[in-house]
Image (spheres, helix red, strand yellow):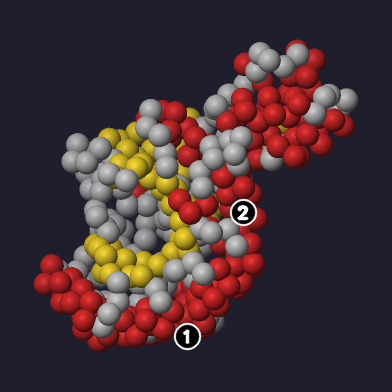
Amino acid sequence: MKENIVSLLPTELEQELTSLGEPRYRAGQVFRSLGRGVRDFDAMKDLPLSLREKLRERYEIYAPKVLNKQISKLDGTIKYLWELRDGNAVETVLMQYRHGNTVCISSQVGCRQGCAFCASTIGGLVRGLEPAEMLDEVLFTQLDSGLPISNIVLMGIGEPLDNFDNVMRFLELVNHTQGMNIGMRHITLSTCGLIERFDELAERDLQITLSVSLHAPDDETRSRIMPANHGRGVDALMDACRRYYERTGRRISFEYAMINGVNDSAEHARLLAKRARSVGAHVNLIPLNHVEERPFQPTTQGHMKAFIRILEDAGVNVTVRRSLGGDVDASCGQLRRKRERALHDA
């Protein structure tokens, strides 16, 4: 299979083109065309025909196809289901806030982490996304919606740290000044806690926000709903978070989906407060999105308020994620699951 040219950085394009006997400046022309969403070598009219033919022989280029697009009547949230070159599909969600537009992208087709409340893990992992495919989620969401994107969260389908090298390359591409030029401080990477990658990520000092999907402060509860906790444990996760903070100076956020009768007790709140204080973490509580194939239900308003009060009384900075796109299956993985069921039943 040919390499996708969109995954190449300008310096790599320079090396490739000079090796073909082309002048160095051609690399900038190609990179800028790709950054505008050009996905046809013949459409790069500023390149000579001979170069376009060389590129076609050596590289793959394609645009993702919109399989499904849903726009929320409640808040304008847009959910895309993109078809990739191999027929697989991933989801991207565009959310509109007062401070700018945020795109939530997928990093894998499927997921191997097996979180018990999540639709993305049903069916397991198919493959990791290429850097070009992640970049195209951002770029083509912006082009299709007509809305400028200022923030990115890697919280869609998949575990970003399980696709580490491709995600790191994507971050370089989307941050590049000749490309979309989205600052690292406007990018959040969410992980279920693959702590073996934390130190390597910290060494890169990318200035992104690391968001840890904690969802339970104790091993018994967390291991029951998050298989990734097995062999690692919450204590080891806290140690990894502490090292990350000390190395980067970047405050970590704990994502915590409130699940009725599972992780929403006063005891859970008190232990969560202790964990958060130990690493200086911000806590973001998430009203659970019910998934058809899963038995879990969101916590009650009463439990949510009591939980927040305990955290605030303990001096923890806590927010509640605003629910967006409730009428367009905005919870990760649901559109893809509907498509898979339809293909299976056909």
Which image quadrant for residue 33? Answer: top right
Residue plotted at (53% across, 59% down) = 207
Residue 248 spot, x, y in % from top left: 55, 68
Judge left or right: residue 294 versus residue 201. left
Give amino acid for label 1.
Asp
Q: Nearer the viewer, residue 131 or 246?
A: 246
Residue 167 spot, x, y in % from top left: 59, 53
Indicate the secondary structure of the residue bearing disc 2: helix
Q: Is residue 220 above or below residue 96?
A: below
Indicate the secondary structure of the residue bearing disc 1: helix
Residue with the most extreme front position = 249
Judge left or right: residue 116 versus residue 311. right
Residue 337 spot, x, y in % from top left: 38, 48
Residue plotted at (22% across, 41% down) = 75
Residue hosting label 1? 235
Give amino acid for label 2.
Met
Q: Residues within 10 Å of mark 2 (few under 14, many from 20)?
A: some
Residue 114 spot, x, y in % from top left: 45, 66
Q: Nearer the viewer, residue 184 or 343?
A: 184
| Residue 168 image label | 2
Q: How many marks?
A: 2
Residue plotted at (51% across, 32% down) = 64
Q: Earlier in the sequence, mark 2 or mark 1?
A: 2
Instruction: Name the quadrant of the N terminus.
Output: top right
Residue 340 appears in the picture as rendered: no
Mark 2 and mark 1 residues within 8 Å of each other at the beta carbon = no
Q: Residues within 10 Å of mark 1 (few under 14, many from 20)?
A: few
Give the distance between the C-alpha atoms of the residues marked 2 and 1, in whole angstroms: 27 Å
